[in-house]
Image (cartoon, grey):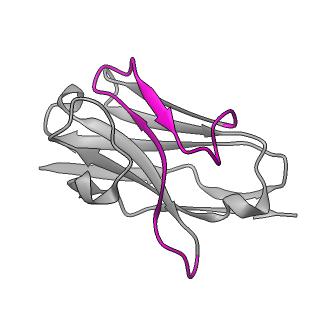
Amino acid sequence: QVKLVESGGGLVQAGGSLRLSCAASGRTFDTYVLGWFRQAPGKEREFVATVSRSGGRTYYADSVRGRFTISRDNAKNTVYLQINSLTPADTAAYYCAADLGARYGTTRADDYDYWGQGTQVTVSS
């Protein structure tokens, strides 16, 4: 079992930055891959970024590559998503997720076993 709790969302102006955090508990933290997804109103949940168990490998959606950075601190049982140069198109609920079966990250939501409750990011123009 893994429990994930996101924080750090909020209202920000276009061009601004936020750092999202996701604190995990339960299973040993460095035994699973972590990912971030987002879902805007009326749209399907989409992949944002993923990080391997050690933190050494990351992968991003094309829409966020170069603006978003995923990282994890295995000593603090926390994964982060630094989001820069925000645009209104980034407005969504952001979710972190844990994939217990992978060694490296995947982009498919169905591969992830546990999900947090989400944190809202709203970008004003």
Write the residue at 30% across / 50% down: 4
The C terminus sits in image quarter: bottom right
| Outermost residue to the bottom | 42
Q: Residue at x 20, y 54 (%)?
A: 113
Magenta-colored stretch includes residue 50: yes
Residue at 33% across, 36% down: 105
Front in this rendered view, residue 26 or 90: 90
Q: Residue furthest front?
A: 62
Using the image, determine if residue 63 lies above or below residue 60.
below
Q: Is residue 60 left or right of residue 28?
A: right
Task: Tell whether 109 sits left or right of 17.
Answer: left
Q: Position of residue 66 (x, y in %)?
A: 68, 32
Q: Residue furthest right?
A: 125
Q: With respect to residue 95, does 33 lie above or below?
A: above
Q: Is residue 123 above or below residue 73?
A: below
* Quadrant assignment, res 53: top left
> Of helix, strand and loop, which mostly describes the magenta segment?
loop
Q: In screen coordinates, is 87 left or right of 57?
A: right
How far across and how far down the image is residue 32, in percent? 22, 34
Q: Residue at x 13, y 38 (%)?
A: 27
- Residue 93 magenta: no
- Give x and y (percent) for residue 25: 22, 42
Q: Which residues are magenta?
A: 41-67
Residue 17 in the image: state x and y as whole percent.
73, 42
Image label count = 0
